[in-house]
Image (spheres, rainbow, N blue to C red):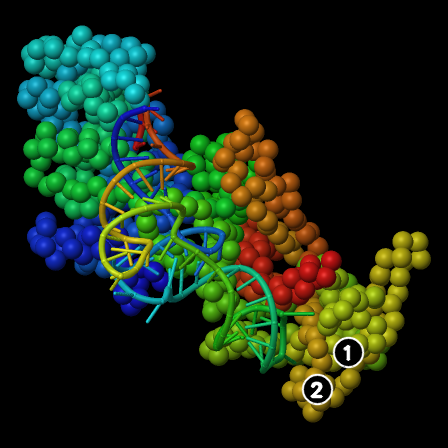
Amino acid sequence: MTSDSSSGSKDFIRTLIAQDVKAGKHGGRVHTRFPPEPNGHLHIGHAKAICLNFTVAEEQHGRYNLRFDDTNPSKEHVDYVTSIQEDIRWLGFDWEDRLFHASDYFEQLYQFAVKLIRDGNAYVDSLSADEIRANRGTLTESGTDSPHRIRSVTENLDLFARMRAGEFEDGAHVLRAKIDMTSPNINLRDPTLYRIRRVPHYRAGNAWNIYPTYDFAHPLSDSLEGITHSLCTLEFQDHRPLYEWVLNACQVDCHSQQIEFARLNMNYTVMSKRKLLQLVDEGHVSGWDDPRLLTLKGLRRRGYTPESIRTFCEQVGVAKRDGIIEMPALEHAIREDLNRRAFRVMAVLHPLKVIIDNFPEGQVEDMNAVNNPEDAAAGSRTVPFSRELYIEQDDFREDPPKKFFRMTPGQEVRLRYAYIVRCERVVKDEQTGAILEVHCTYDPDTRSGGPQAGRKVKGTLHWVSAAHAVSAEVRLYESLFTKANPAEEKNGVDFRSYLNPDSLHILPNCQVEPSLADAKPGTPYQFERQGYFCVDSDTTADKLVFNRTVALRDSWAKIEKKSQ
RNA sequence: UGGGGGAUCGUCUAGGGGCAAGACAUUAGAUUUUGGUUCUAAGAACCCAGGUUCGAUUCCUGGUCCCCCAGCCA
């Protein structure tokens, strides 16, 4: 834990905030906020920002707000507002009564704009968007003043009031800060503060015909809420001088400090709202909660726990250099969490029939199985054993490679929590040669807990009793993309061309132990020797569906791969 | 050839004028009725060049490379 106080090392933001607290800045108060725009669903990158903002405040005994940055009505929607709140609560954060909206401040923001005009710090420009762009200059050439820059305060006030009143078409006028058209920082070349948008706001209704831009609304919203430290991502670094300018020009009481950090990027996926939306809209995934997506809804459905996501966010740390986290780091976080809490069960994904020839027909024995070896309090359960079983196809090889410790003719293996068996013969399809069933004998003395149970055998297999098994559908997921950085669209190649055609495998006829019959959606399990799975929301009374959250580490797969 | 940031193991993150630390990943071994877990061990890094210094990854100078900015998006 890099940011854990026990490690003694803090990230640069925590260090800075601790200094501010010590110095008594803002009276030693720390107040942060998470400011999503309600125009999309949250993903793991947002989780990093949420965890940072909220835990930093908690650590300093401060507060944190949730604020919807809803200044662009043409893109925003209530559905996102609801969804975002759900996701943050699910992550385990509580903003208590501090839920705010930039749209709550529209009237105050308007008054600040009027002040700016009065003070000669803002003017109404009547140039078109194209003309403004043309006048802005380039990265290397400075811009030129708009002819409207010298408008009188009176005229500006009049025009701005009429903009608000809805007298003008969209785009007819705009309110601009009067800063410096020759600034090397393009954001300071008289940035737009208000634009006319004669569309209803999902929250403010038809009250407004003009809406403030991010650069104007954000610093003032922070100030109005008494935010002490305004954390945002790196791309806003260039906006910091403007953030400062707005607070100074408006002469606010609370002057928040903007601090930037690197956003989270992950391998083999995309994170931008635009691309995510495209994947959903074009049907490349089933929806925003598709388990292959790193949206919070997707991760949740996949079986990731809030704790694992928060741990992961702590572990990746906070810095200013942009990088890409490898997927295994996320997988490690969920394995670690689920290893501690998931009940173990036996489930056969690719069934192969096994018949114990010397086991009495019709006899059923209840085998005692431990629910979670990591947690004695989890107790145990009973699993029925009978003459006909299913084992995993991969667990049988007629012609085994070296170091194959599973079932193979003549070799003894243990059936977990049951008996040691030996394969005697194989029944094959005469046409195809496919293995239809495997016949074994068992040693009655080796029953789990019995006199010979301790006998050393190399392999232990999971199994289910054919007569008692419950059918289930299991969905296996692999990475959505085949390229580490699909967003890097070199040579005009679109990120969608890197979509992994094998990212979803549906196994319609798996056999799981009977204790799973009434498993509830969302419950995590470890299918022994295979991975962590959770009950999917598609599960119905007569159809069980599981998602594989993550596979167990598989050292046999490594050995096998190496020998090839 | 404007401005703003950044560069430490494969990846992420610490540190800091004197043995470069942790996590993930990798490799080897031990334990194991999950080829899981756990444990032990190993390999693995300071962008480059000068300068200051007894000593520079750290300080200075000059480079190189990467990211961001020309929305009436956030």
Front residue of A532/A467: it is: A532
Mark number, residue A412: 1
Q: Position of residue A30 (x, y in %)?
A: 17, 52
Front residue of A75/A140: it is: A140
Check disc 2 and report its element: helix, strand or loop.
loop
Q: Is residue A371 above or below residue A110?
A: below
Check disc 1 and report its element: helix, strand or loop.
strand
Residue that lies at the very extreme toward the top in this rendered image: A147
Tell me the quadrant of the picture where the C terminus of chain A can be found: bottom right
Instruction: Give amino acid for label 1.
Output: Glu
- Residue sitting at 26 percent across and 13 percent down? A135
Q: Is residue A336 above or below residue A27?
A: below
Asked whether the viewer can see residue A518, the reply is: no
Residue that lies at the very extreme toward the bottom in this rendered image: A451
Asked whether the viewer can see residue A526, the reply is: yes
Q: Position of residue A11 (x, y in %)?
A: 28, 55
Decide which of tag 2 and tag 1 comes sooner along the chain. Answer: 1
